[in-house]
Amino acid sequence: MSYRVVHYINQFFANIGGEEMAHVPPELREGHVGPGLAFNQAWKGEAEIVQTIVCGDSYFAEHEKDAKAQVLAWVKEAKPDLFIAGPAFNAGRYGYACANVALAVKEELGIPVLTGMYEENPGADMKEKILIVATTNSAAGMRKAAPAMAKLAMKLMRGEALGASCEEGYMPNGVRKNFFEKERGSKRAVDMLLAKLAEKPFTTEYPMPSFDRVAPNKAIKDLSKATIALCTSGGIVPKGNPDHIESSSASHYGEYCLDGVDVLTAETYETAHGGYDPVYANENPNRVLPVDVMREFEREGKIGKLHNYFYTTVGNGTAVASAKKFAMEYAQKLLQANVNAVIMTST
């Protein structure tokens, strides 16, 4: 008799659609769906996905309490040996949903749980509460992620003791596991040093935090002749959020024209940000994106001109890698437009 598994995935991996279908409520399907096939194949009959729960990322984010309740009810009825979610890779809202649903199943039903995602996914913050297998930042890494998750899942279902995170492939969770290395520390250290000196790849046993430092550019000598652009992670967008920038864990940014715009009004602009009280930003969007003040400076000759486009996204839960990608893209546009400086506002 094989172990029973319930699998949680989002609308994309269920082949329902992308962002335009992220509003779909929880749905229960029999058997495996999408990436569930890879898990079943890896288990070779020892375990099987008996049911798959599908839920849209936006629906979960906006109806978390109701979504959790429905998922818990289905999982309780199925009585699985394991609950597995994802993998979510670098999809922020999906990762958040996977981690929080898994935690609820673990704490309220006492069922072993497992998920997988990229280390910079906001859901990875739950790594000390649930087991999370580290994956690449895109679904292109499914071929490696599924076998790694399936192997760890089988250990959980069998009730076997887990080894250290570096052995099993899950993210470090603050729990230390003792094990014996094949070679003593002095030799491993010398081997790493030699590899580093020879500019060969090596893996440190004690990774240090990486702090991104950006060297300041040279000061602008004459602001009265400079073109200044406005950018923000505060989520200011035209009314109605035409590009559907997510309120959390943004997957893209918006580019909007300011030609003929002297001031942002409550009738024409709003914030898409879900990480702060939007009342004051919606009442006067210039509080986050100061177009009104920049136009004053422009008229007074304090700056040459305000760039006719602004770039905006939501910083709430957005992965550092995604933020860097956005900036690299629109920085090239700013350079091509001969922009001299950028004022980047937050919340």
Image: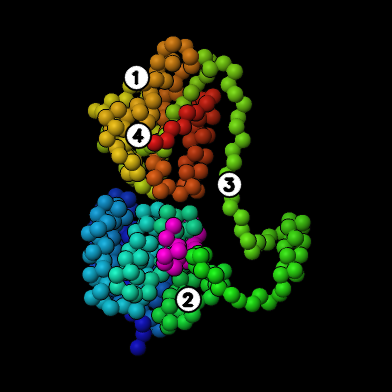
Dividing the picture into quadrants, the one containing residue 292 is top left
Q: Amino acid at mark 3?
A: Phe
Q: Amino acid at mark 2?
A: Lys
Identify the residue at image location x=35%, y=26%: 286
The x and y percentages for residue 312 are 40, 36
Residue 195 in the image: above or below residue 280: below
Cα–Cα span, label 2 and label 1: 59 Å
Q: Nearer the viewer, residue 271 or 307?
A: 271
**How far apart are labels 1 and 3 at the CA level?**
38 Å
- Name which of mark 1 and mark 3 comes first in the sequence: 3
* Residue at the spot of label 3: 211
* Left or right of 96 on screen, residue 187: right
Q: Residue at x 33, y 41 (%)?
A: 276
The residue singled out by tag 2 in the image is: 151
The Cα–Cα distance between marks 1 and 4, rounded to whole angstroms, is 15 Å
Q: Position of residue 19 (x, y in %)?
A: 32, 50
Callout 4 crowding tier (Cα within 10 Å): few <14, some 14–19, many ≥20: many
Amino acid type, label 1:
Asp
Among numbered discs 1 and 4, the one appearing first in the sequence: 4
Residue identifier under label 1: 262
Mark 3, other Cα within 10 Å: few <14 / some 14–19 / many ≥20? few
Report how far apart the C-alphas of labels 3 and 4 lie in the structure: 28 Å
Residue under the image location 44 percent in, 15 percent down: 298
Secondary structure category for the residue under label 3? loop
Q: Quadrant of the C terminus?
A: top left
Q: What is the secondary structure assignment of the residue under circle 2?
A: helix
Question: Quadrant location of residue 273?
Answer: top left
Of tags 3 and 2, which is closer to the observer?
A: 3
**What is the spatial separation of the Cα atoms under label 2 and label 4, in whole angstroms?**
45 Å
The reply to whether dot 2 and dot 1 touch (C-beta < 8 Å) is no
